[in-house]
């Protein structure tokens, strides 16, 4: 399948089929509205061609209802398509809470996927059929764009930012996965496979990966390895704030602003901690932008998310109490 050129790739999800219906219906509307114009152009060009006897005097009769209808009716039809497509756009931007999360790191020129259980793969993405999947994506270098034609979805992947994409693939099979943003010399080689498996086959694949260490566990080990626990541990002499309950809480910043501690905030607090200094804390935390890559930051963020059930502390990553 991946080696052939398909003008209309197969649909692997209900959303993809909705997109096909939308495109087909809108195409039919365009033909319906434009065909009479072209037909009448040909008829009038033939009827009033040079040298042919015809009454070329201006018409005196006008039908205001006819003239109004050919403007109002197309407008209402197009407006209907606007609301239809807007509803589809909003639905694909709002992943369900129980979606399976897969972290994605794009780099020249490969796709790196890491599942919540710790399984990792490069240029292949295995997902279970019939279950919502959310991709949390970032780039390690330039702008990329994850495109799965069979799902009819595409999302830019940006450096130093998190973007997300979600889907529910319901048709098992192997489909192409592409980068749709020119990202350098080997952009055309940044390809992969999107593999939709039956739930039992996906569970078997996960078990065969032999990965019993999840992202949060990897993040905890990294947290200690790079010295984060030296300041944020309970026995730290620095008296930096605890990170328990930070994820999802509202953090007050210098200047009176507030921000919710989501994944993007945690990422920025690790890589550029002094860009958003917490009110009442000194901007003394070192930046880890030259020490950690995006894959490691994803592990740390997963670890901090795993601590969200604890009681929130009065502080966060970006500083120390004076």
Image (cartoon, grey):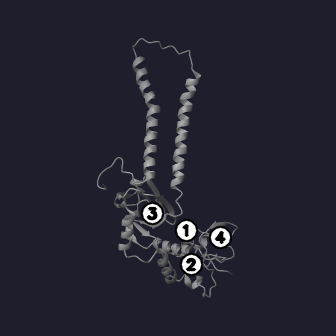
Picture quarter containing residue 42?
top left
Give the distance between the C-alpha atoms of the residues marked 1 and 3, in whole angstroms: 20 Å
Give how far across and how far down residue 119 sits, in percent. Answer: 40, 72
Residue 104 against residue 180 in the figure, above or below: below
Element under disc 4: strand
Q: Earlier in the sequence, mark 1 or mark 4?
A: 4
Residue at 45% across, 58% down = 168
Residue 303 against residue 34 in the figure, above or below: below
Give how far across and how far down residue 300 sits, in percent. Answer: 51, 75
Give the distance between the C-alpha atoms of the residues marked 1 and 2, in whole angstroms: 19 Å
Task: Evaluate if marks 1 and 4 touch, with contact meaning CB atoms under 8 Å apart.
Answer: no
Residue 166 against residue 46 in the figure, above or below: below
Give the distance between the C-alpha atoms of the residues marked 4 and 2, in whole angstroms: 19 Å
Q: Which residue is mark 1?
A: 263
Q: Nearer the viewer, residue 163 or 32?
A: 32
Q: Earlier in the sequence, mark 1 or mark 2?
A: 1
Q: Earlier in the sequence, mark 1 or mark 3?
A: 3
Task: Evaluate if marks 1 and 2 touch, with contact meaning CB atoms under 8 Å apart.
Answer: no
Give the distance between the C-alpha atoms of the residues marked 4 and 3, in whole angstroms: 30 Å
Q: Which residue is mark 4?
A: 251
Task: Evaluate if marks 4 and 2 touch, with contact meaning CB atoms under 8 Å apart.
Answer: no
Q: Residues within 10 Å of mark 3 (few under 14, many from 20)?
A: some
Element under disc 2: loop
Q: Which residue is mark 3?
A: 142
| Residue 189 seen in the figure | yes
Say which of marks 1 and 3 sits in front.
Answer: 1
- How many marks the image carries: the answer is 4
Q: Which disc number belongs to residue 286?
A: 2
Residue located farthest toward the front when viewing the structure as drawn: 200
């Amino acid at each position: 399948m991946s080696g052939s050129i398909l003008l209309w790739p197969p649909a692997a999800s209900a959303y993809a089929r909705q997109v096909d219906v939308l495109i087909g219906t809108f195409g039919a509307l365009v033909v319906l509205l434009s065909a009479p114009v072209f037909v009448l152009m040909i008829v009038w060009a033939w009827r009033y061609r040079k040298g042919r006897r015809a009454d070329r005097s201006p018409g005196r009769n006008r039908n205001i209802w006819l003239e109004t209808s050919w403007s109002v009716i197309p407008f209402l039809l197009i407006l209907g398509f606007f609301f239809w497509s807007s509803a589809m756009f909003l639905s694909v931007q709002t992943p369900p809470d129980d979606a399976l999360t897969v972290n994605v790191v794009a780099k020249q020129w490969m796709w790196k996927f890491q599942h919540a259980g710790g399984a990792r793969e490069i240029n292949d993405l295995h997902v279970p059929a019939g279950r919502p999947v959310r991709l949390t994506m970032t780039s390690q270098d330039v702008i990329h764009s994850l495109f799965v034609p069979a799902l009819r979805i595409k999302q830019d992947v940006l450096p130093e930012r998190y973007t997300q994409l979600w889907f529910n693939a319901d048709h098992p099979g192997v489909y192409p996965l592409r980068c749709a943003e020119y990202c350098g010399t080997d952009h055309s080689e940044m390809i992969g496979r999107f593999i939709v498996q039956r739930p039992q086959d996906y569970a078997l694949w996960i078990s065969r990966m032999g990965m019993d260490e999840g992202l949060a566990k990897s993040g905890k080990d990294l947290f200690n390895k790079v010295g984060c626990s030296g300041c944020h541990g309970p026995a730290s002499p620095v008296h930096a704030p605890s990170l328990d309950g930070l994820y999802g809480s509202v953090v007050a910043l210098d200047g009176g602003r507030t921000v919710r501690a989501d994944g993007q905030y945690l990422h920025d607090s690790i890589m550029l901690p002094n860009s958003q200094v917490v009110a009442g804390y000194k901007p003394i935390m070192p930046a880890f932008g030259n020490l950690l890559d995006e894959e490691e930051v994803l592990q740390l963020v997963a670890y901090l998310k795993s601590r969200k059930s604890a009681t929130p502390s009065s502080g966060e990553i970006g500083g120390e109490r004076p």
